[in-house]
Image (tube, rainbow, N blue to C red):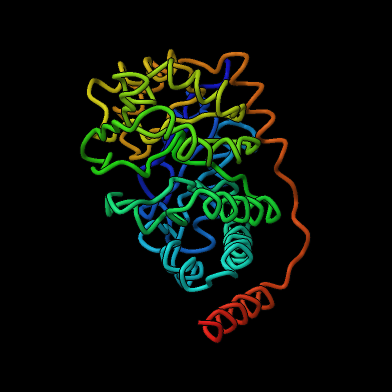
Amino acid sequence: MAQGATILGCSGSTLSASEASFFREADPFGFIVFDRNLEDHDQILHLCESLRDCVGRDAPILIDQEGGRVQRLRPPLATQWLPPLDDVKRYGANAPRAMYLRYRIIADELMHLGIDANCAPMVDIASDETHEFLKNRCYSNDLQSVVEIGQAVAGGLIDGGVLPVLKHIPGHGRAVSDSHLDLPIVDTNDELLRQNDFAAFAALNDLPMGMTAHITYSAFDDRPATLSSKMMGLIRADIGFDGLIMTDDITMKALAGSLAELSRLSIDAGCDVVLHCNGDMGEMQEVVEASGTMNAAAIRRGEAALATRHTPDPVDISHLHAQLEALANEAGNDA
């Protein structure tokens, strides 16, 4: 059976027999884990092993481990981090190096648990109007700073053996509503979007994976980017991103329609795989059936993404934490 064009979640900390059977048949490209799936070190390792056993291969297992509010793993399983924007401000001129170290530590913590992909960097550019659900997850309101820090975040993850997932393509920073609840509509003209918001993603277009934005950019289309062949074409041709593109969670309220319809439209628009997060069996069945299997281009991109995984060089994590503390002290002395 061809590989399914999905990334799926599971309902709890262990797989039920019905989940295992379903995943075996659906054969998703990968999996994603959330708080509900994460209890302790041994349990997480076993869950990751069980998920991979279902599909009979080293499938990627994703997580959202940004820091701050969007941090699925917390002490004692992982370091507690400030929201990204708070840390960027705290480190000042040292922010790129500090964010590299931060995500190199995160990568080490994830790898020890069997998790090998992180939904970061997030290179959405903040503004005064950016909705609060997103704002302190951004790195800056300045294009150059966002690019520099985004590259550092990606570098820390890659050096630690973890796949970075660039988000939210082609830019979520101008959204004044929460796409978990409503569809944001951005009316900014195309020239400014290309020069600023889209340019941040063009600068990181060599990353292996990316996640769409559930946002309508009225200068280009009246459909959300996830469902828009025009926007997917722009992401591929103009932004130049040739990595594997996954949707943001297909159940978010920004998208109107049945899950089957939304899944089909996403694939038809040019997304490679559909992300479904909540582990609801009935919903997953609907998404899997509608998404179908990965096409030849998606398979190529998926294989290329997975080929970037590697066993990282050993690192002294305590030394990296000490470097972070030194950078914070230096920034404080310069303030």
Q: Within the image, what quadrant is residue 52 found in?
A: top right
Residue occupying image coordinates x 58% and y 45%: 164
- Which residue appears farthest toward the right when viewing the image? 313
- Pinpoint residue 41: horizontal percent, then vertical percent: 53, 63
- Pinpoint residue 255: horizontal percent, then vertical percent: 27, 27
> For this rendering, which residue is in front, 272 or 62?
272
Give the quadrant of the N terminus. top right
Image side of residue 86 versus residue 324, left or right: left
Q: How many marks?
A: 0
Answer above or below: position of 180 versus 240. Answer: below
- Pinpoint residue 7: horizontal percent, then vertical percent: 47, 32
Residue occupying image coordinates x 60% and y 70%: 94
Image side of residue 120 versus residue 86, left or right: right
> For this rendering, which residue is in front, 304 or 175?
175
Answer above or below: position of 198 versus 301. Answer: below
> For this rendering, which residue is in front, 288 or 194?
194
Image side of residue 213 versus residue 321, left or right: left
Answer above or below: position of 155 versus 290. Answer: below
Residue occupying image coordinates x 62% and y 56%: 152
Residue occupying image coordinates x 40% and y 20%: 266
- Pinpoint residue 319: horizontal percent, then vertical percent: 69, 77
